[in-house]
Structure formats: C-alpha cells, structure tokens
Image (cartoon, rainbow, N blue to C red):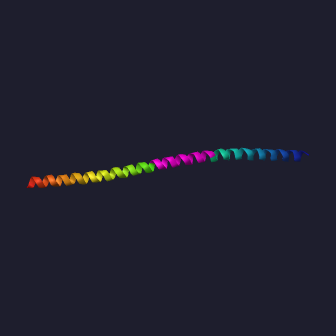
C-alpha cells in the first residue's frame, strides 16, 4: 500500500510539474511574439533610416558635383 501511495504522490507531482511547465511555456510564447513584433518595428525603422542615409549620401554627391562645376566655371572665367 505504501508503495502505491508513493507512486500516486510522484504521479501527482509530475502532473503538477507538467501543468506549471505548460503555463511557463505559454507565457514564453506570448513574450516571444511580443519581442518578434518589436523586432519587426525596429527593422522597419532601421530600413527607413537606411533609405534616409542613402538619400543624404546622394544629395551630398550631387552638391559636391555642383560645387566642383561652379569652381570650374569660376576658374575658367578668371582665366579669360
């Protein structure tokens, strides 16, 4: 009888442990989904910033070329 009681206690303990692990797993799944959503927002923001940087670099290149052209024109007029 004693061994049956011990077995019952162990089974009860295991069932309780499984329930706790399932609850913890559920919480972790929810947390993971929230973190994945945050990562998506951050990635989107980063992509927008990357596009802004590309546009700024292009603008800088165009302005540099414009300044170079103006300098050439000014130098040509001085030489004439």
Query: Where 13 sits versus 66, above or below?
Result: above
Q: Which quarter of the rendering shows the C terminus?
A: bottom left
Residue 54 locus on image (x, y percent): 37, 52
Image side of residue 40 versus residue 70, left or right? right
Residue at the spot x=65%, y=44% of the render? Answer: 27
Residue at the spot x=23%, y=53% of the render? Answer: 66
Name the residue nearer the viewer: 10 or 55: 55
Q: Main secondary structure of the magenta part?
A: helix
Image side of residue 59 versus residue 47, left or right? left
Image side of residue 54 versus residue 26, left or right? left
Is residue 42 magenta-colored? yes
Residue at the spot x=63%, y=48% of the render? Answer: 29
Name the residue nearer the viewer: 9 or 20: 20
Image side of residue 22 versus residue 33, left or right? right
Is residue 75 magenta-colored? no
Q: Residue furthest left?
A: 80
Residue 76 locus on image (x, y percent): 12, 55
Q: Residue furthest right?
A: 1
Range drawn in magenta: 30-45
How many marks do you count on the picture?
Answer: 0
Residue 8 locus on image (x, y percent): 85, 46
């Amino acid at each position: 009888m004693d061994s049956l009681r011990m077995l019952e206690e162990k089974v009860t303990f295991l069932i309780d442990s499984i329930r706790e692990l399932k609850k913890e797993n559920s919480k972790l799944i929810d947390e993971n989904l929230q973190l994945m959503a945050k990562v998506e927002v951050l990635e989107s923001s980063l992509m927008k910033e990357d596009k802004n940087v590309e546009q700024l670099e292009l603008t800088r290149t165009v302005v540099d070329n414009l300044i170079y052209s103006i300098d050439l024109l000014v130098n040509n007029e001085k030489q004439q």
